[in-house]
Amino acid sequence: MNISHPSASRRSFVKRLSSGVAAFSVAANFPALAIGAENGSRKKLGIALVGLGNYSTKQLAPALVDAQDSYLAGIVTGTKSKEAEWSQKYGIKRTNIYNYENFDSIASNKDIDIVYIVLPNSMHAEYTIRAANAGKHVICEKPMALNVEEAQAMIEACKANNVLLSIGYRLHFDPNTREIMKVAKEKPYGNVHYIQSEASFIMGNNLKAWRLNRELAGGGAVMDMGIYCIQAARYATGEEPIAIRAQEYKTDWEKFKDVDETVTWQMEFPSGAYSNSTTSYNIRSNRLYISYRNGSAQLEPATKYNGIKGSIQDRLLEPQPINQQTRQMDGFARSIMEGVPSIVPGEEGLRDMKVIEALYRSLKNGGNRVLI
Ligand code: NAD
């Protein structure tokens, strides 16, 4: 890997960047009816992917090929060999290719409307703030940041630069997940009183992976997959949790010496609803169960890229032939063109960061109840 990044000074860098937003600010694109490339008769907004790892390579770039309102206009990579490879494969102009050193000069590139941060978690805040300071709208992957303080700085930087911020919560664009959200809103079966959610996978054996490094990942399974359980409990109830208790289990002390392996937690909601969730880097599970006063719903798988399916009472929720990522990026492009906030704005990511901070506080004090 040919990457240079001064991660040691990241924290102070984020502070410096966010406090200097006004000074760095360039003419903002928002409201943005006049931007984007004319592509046939339809206007499309140009996206630059920052970080060409697994998710960008296997999901986001292919999803943009079929997009209607957005397209892959640029890339930001620290790996020289990827420049020609991606340029050839996706027809990306040489002038739209950046590395981590010259990234800030993206400010003057009119082809790029949206910068999409797909880097290790510890780099989300820094690159979101730099993109906002460059006057670009931003999509930032989940988890939005390492903590609440960073998340707030990211929201502030986007506001100060008059650009929109969206978090990579693709499930909000999945039709079956949206059915669950609709039931939470309309309550045809009464209030939710119990939610069970699980999101886990079995981590490979590369001990150098950034997901196993606390400094780069900020935590383990909770940050990566547990965030889906928090999201599910929140959108299945339509409420914000008020208290949490968490318990941790470890079976592989070598692999997970730095980050959490398996965590189970319970959340209380204002209506009296209660959730129980488990996330793990050493279990195979992916489901959501909701018990309403007069019915139930379930999704399994609940968070995968394809084939989300389940039922609400007797109604089957069949897998939908859609691409979540295409919808997510097109959805954000339309928000920008219409001058309305993303349906998953920075504030949505911030709420999850508050829950995660409370969860880790509970783990630290032996599983005691912590107010959120
Ligand atoms: P990855 O390891 O495959 O890719 C990370 C990229 O960051 C690589 O291109 C790597 O070269 C680059 N990088 C730059 N500096 C680095 C450093 N110091 N250390 C390591 N890599 C560095 O990771 P990924 O699976 O693509 O995940 C990237 C982000 O996307 C994460 O925040 C993850 O949570 C998120 N993600 C979201 C989804 C989703 O469904 N929304 C799915 C997968 C990943």
Image (cartoon, rainbow, N blue to C red):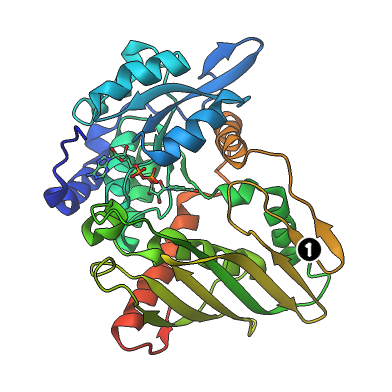
Identify the residue at horizontal 86%, vertical 62% (top origin): 315
From where the camera sits, is residue 269 visible? no
Look at the image and tell me in which quarter the C terminus lies: bottom left
Report which quarter residue 272 is drawn in: bottom right
Viewed as shown, does residue 297 lie left or right of 362? right
Residue in the image at 55% along x and 43% along y: 341
The quarter of the image holding the N terminus is top left
Say which of 31 and 118 sits in front: 118
Q: From this viewpoint, which residue is outermost toward the top?
A: 40
Image location of residue 55, percent across then percent down: 44, 41
Residue 293 position (above or below residue 113): below
Q: Is residue 146 left or right of residue 339?
A: left
Image vertical order of residue 330 relative to residue 72, above or below: below
Q: Position of residue 89 (x, y in %)?
A: 45, 17
Q: Which residue is mark 1?
A: 311
Residue at (34%, 77%) from the top-left corner?
Answer: 250
User: Which of the four quarters of the rendered structure image does ligand 1 lie in?
Assistant: top left
Dot 1 lies on which element?
A: strand
**Horizontal and vertical percent for residue 313?**
83, 69
Residue 11 appears anywhere in the view: yes
Mark 1 belongs to which amino acid?
A: Ser
